[in-house]
Image: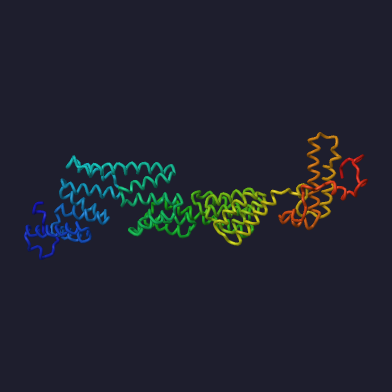
Amino acid sequence: MATENCDAVNMDPDMELLSDEELEREAEGFKEQGNAFYIKKDYAEAFNYYSKAIDMCPKNASYYGNRAATLMMLCRYREALEDSQQAVRLDNDFMKGHLREGKCHLSLGNAMAASRCFQRVLELEPDNSQVQQELKNADSVLEYERMAEIGFEKRDFRMVVFCMDRALESAAACHRFKILKAECLALLGRYPEAQSVASDILRMDSTNADALYVRGLCLYYEDCIDKAVQFFVQALRMAPDHDKARLACRNAKALKAKKEEGNKAFKEGNFEAAYELYSEALTIDPNNIKTNAKLYCNRATVGSKLKKLEQAIEDCTKAIKLDETYIKCHYVHLYILLYMDTEQYEEAVRDYEKVYQTEKTKEHKHFLKHAQLELKKSKRKDYYKVLGVNKNATEDEIKKAYRKRALLHHPDRHSGASPELQKEEEKKFKEVGEAFSVLSDPKKKSRYDSGQDLEDDGMNMGDFDANNIFKAFFGGPGGFSFEGNSGTT
């Protein structure tokens, strides 16, 4: 470089007494010391000596180029970009300056600007293989940006994360790419990863509105709505035109308000209003999985109060589908009780087995056993249905029901029917007798209701004779005849 590059500008007064040649020698000495530290990978010391060289000769392009290289090694790409740009302003033919400027642009995610710098390098050195590869890297980043934009519009967030990971291989210091990746991780429910990325950026730049927004988004999706609103408000302070933060803030406030209105109506016993309010809340933001899972459970609770059992079961199913980790006792108990009310015992056992595997508490074990017992009972003959009475039927009601059903299905009544019908009616007659023999005996009825095996009482239903019950009930031979009887009671 020419000696006129060493102007005594803004120097120590003592330096003003040195000639240009002496200044240049001093600067070269500092540069050499900087080079030595750079080779040793002591980049902090190298930076200091290159800075001293620049102070002595502020118009020497190579000194800025060297300091830019050091700053790049320290991952201080924005400062490195400034130094490399100053280097090429001082010397537009400084190939390394253009190359380093391009690398800084690429690392910071500006692939278009990087390509222009790399093209300038090729003008200076057409056979430079390194810059040819860098151009390919810049083109790849541009393509991944394009694919990510399409993926985001289609809500294919996994595709966006993939594209940003690939782009960050070349643009490692690009906050914009990291933020987009973090936002999509949040939308995919991968909150710890998203929070980690946003927090890393906030440590470097506490005023980054995009990072504040993503941090709030994670809290919002984790149902920490009050804290989320604080981050959204902070993001809007930093960037008043941040549309995503404004929308998320509005949704968060609306969701909280509507949910609280529903809770208030429920506590006041206004179940119809609570049901409607929870339904309205569920339309605010379909992406908020955890909050919506709670809303579905809340609506299921209200639905059970309103006797909307099928809808309540559906709501519970949706809640667990949205968030399998959401296993609060009262919701799980509600889930099982709803299945019991509708006699869907197999589903109840299946779901409660999952719950017990997750939380092996005594309470869960008790409810699992209860569900298994109900399932076992459901697979037996329902003697109450056989007689056509409910489970709270009195002794007289059971007797009347037996009389009616026994007369209806007695084989003598169907002696003129086809063999198939005779066989079917005989089977029903036997079942009616079984049902009466069990439900008319307090001990057997108690064991039957509790789900215990009746064989333990020595009652073998395979050898059961329904005619004995019929004769005992109607008083033996001559006590009843179908001749001249209409068969009605």
Residue 365, horizontal then vertical, whole percent:
61, 59
Q: Residue furthest right?
A: 478
Q: Foreground: 296 or 455?
A: 455
Asked if 121 appears above or below 57 in the picture, the reply is: above
Q: Quadrant of residue 121?
A: top left
372 horizontally vs 160: left or right: right
Residue 327, horizontal then vertical, whole percent:
55, 56
Q: Residue at x 63, y 59 (%)?
A: 366
186 horizontally vs 59: left or right: right
254 horizontally vs 386: left or right: left
356 horizontally vs 246: left or right: right
Residue 153, horizontal then vertical, whole percent:
42, 43
Q: Residue at x 82, y 48 (%)?
A: 402
Asked if 302 appears above or below 12 in the picture, the reply is: above
Q: Foreground: 344 or 108?
A: 344
Q: Quadrant of residue 134?
A: top left
Q: Quadrant of the C terminus?
A: top right
Asked if 137 appears above or below 240 in the picture, the reply is: above
Residue 427, horizontal then vertical, whole percent:
78, 42
Q: Residue furthest bottom?
A: 14
